[in-house]
Amino acid sequence: MSDHREDTTVRALFCIGVRDAFFAAGDDERAAVIDGSRRAFDDLAGRFGLRVLGTFDDDEVMVGPSTTFPWTAYILADVPDYATAARVCGILREHPVGEARLWKYFTIQARLGRPLFFGNE
């Protein structure tokens, strides 16, 4: 029997919340934020070496800002290391939308761990 701690995969759950500024924005600004988000998070595998395992968005049943758990959206991915997870979180600091950056509209944090040793099939 193997020790489940032998798996050295770094699994990240990126938790994304929507800030008040997104809901206060007009239609054109919100559309720019949505388009900017798509571009900012495009090709995570090619840019960061992530293997995205799944995403989750509950924006249809969660209305308004999410400043703490439960968040609005999640990305579950295997990442090469802690530094890469931090770089993915940094997307919000770096990616412009008009005169602002994405962090005006969203918040992000990463939970890091390893794959659970059961329930994977």
Image (spheres, rainbow, N blue to C red):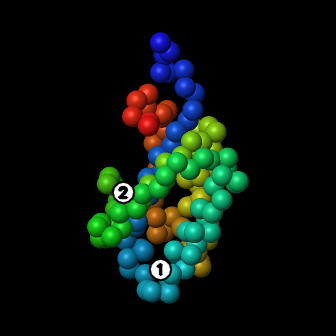
25 horizontally vs 34: left or right: left
Q: Residue at x 49, y 21 (%)?
A: 5
Q: Quadrant of residue 94 in the image?
A: bottom right
Kindly state the secondary structure of the residue where label 1 is placed.
helix
Q: Position of residue 16 (x, y in %)?
A: 44, 58
Q: Residue at x 67, y 47 (%)?
A: 49
Q: What count of labels does the image hold?
A: 2
4 in relation to 35, above or below: above
**Residue 56 appears in the figure:** yes
Q: Quadrant of residue 58 in the image?
A: bottom left
Q: Position of residue 56 (x, y in %)?
A: 42, 57
Tag 1: amino acid: Arg
Q: Residue at x 62, y 47 (%)?
A: 50
Kindly state the secondary structure of the residue where label 2 is placed.
loop
Q: Position of residue 17 (x, y in %)?
A: 40, 60
39 horizontally vs 11: left or right: right
Dot 2 or dot 1: first in sequence order is 1
Q: Which of 22/60 is in front?
A: 60
Q: Which of 46/81 is in front?
A: 46
Q: Residue at x 70, y 54 (%)?
A: 47
Disc marking residue 71: 2
Circle 1 residue = 30
- Work out which residue is located at the far right of the displayed protein and give it: 46
Measure how far apart labels 2 and 1 are at the Cα level.
Answer: 19 Å
**Disc 1 packing (10 Å; few <14; some 14–19; many ≥20):** some
**Residue 110 appears in the figure:** no
The reply to whether discs 2 and 1 touch (Cβ–Cβ < 8 Å) is no
Q: Quadrant of the C terminus?
A: top left
Tag 2: amino acid: Trp
**Disc 2 packing (10 Å; few <14; some 14–19; many ≥20):** many
